[in-house]
Amino acid sequence: MNMRAQDFIDVGSLDDVPLRGSRIVRAPSGDVALFKAADGHVFALRDECPHKKGPLSQGIVHGRSVTCPLHNWVIDLASGAAQGADEGCAHAIALKVENGRILIDARALAPAGA
């Protein structure tokens, strides 16, 4: 799907997200967690583990994964898929970085049903 520039919303500076850390973007549709891997790549997921809805933003970022703080499920940051024997998927959200700013898919911030 080809998204237009207006389909993205600026949610902050790339520098706002710590290396191997996260930042939360509050939204009517549910919180979005932004993650920055050690290699500098940035990812966005719904801030809910597919297991018991644990706050992924409070997990440990390692490689291109995050470990949920509740039950140690490992979630791939690019796809949102649970790794290993675990099954389920956190919703991955499209983003792009332009001029040091993080822009995410505007639909991820819209109220449910909008």
Image (tube, rainbow, N blue to C red):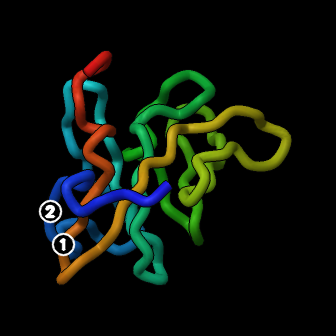
Badge 1: residue crowd in 10 Å (few <14, some 14–19, many ≥20): some
Q: Residue pushed farthest right?
A: 85
Is residue 39 positioned above or below 16 on the image? below
Task: Give the SS element for disc 1.
Answer: strand
Q: CA distance from mark 1 to mark 2?
A: 6 Å
Left or right: 28 as drawn, with respect to 90: left
Q: Look at label 1 and name its amino acid.
A: Arg
Q: Position of residue 38 (x, y in %)?
A: 47, 78
The residue singled out by tag 2 in the image is: 12
Q: Residue at x 28, y 26 (%)?
A: 29
In which quarter of the view is residue 78 placed? Answer: bottom right
Q: Say which label, 1 or 2, has the lower sequence index.
A: 2
The reply to whether the C-beta atoms of the residues labelled 1 and 2 are less than 8 Å apart is: yes
- Quadrant of the snapshot with the C terminus: top left
Q: Look at label 2 and name its amino acid.
A: Gly
In front of the other: 13 or 4: 4
Q: Residue pushed farthest top?
A: 113
Badge 2: residue crowd in 10 Å (few <14, some 14–19, many ≥20): some
Q: Residue at x 48, y 30 (%)?
A: 54
Is residue 17 positioned above or below 44 on the image? below
Q: Position of residue 100 (x, y in %)?
A: 19, 80
In front of the other: 58 or 5: 5
Left or right: 56 as drawn, with respect to 17: right
Q: Position of residue 76 (x, y in %)?
A: 62, 55
Q: Which mark is residue 17?
A: none
Left or right: 58 as drawn, with respect to 80: left
The residue singled out by tag 1 in the image is: 101
Q: Residue at x 41, y 80 (%)?
A: 40
Is residue 13 positioned above or below 24 on the image? below
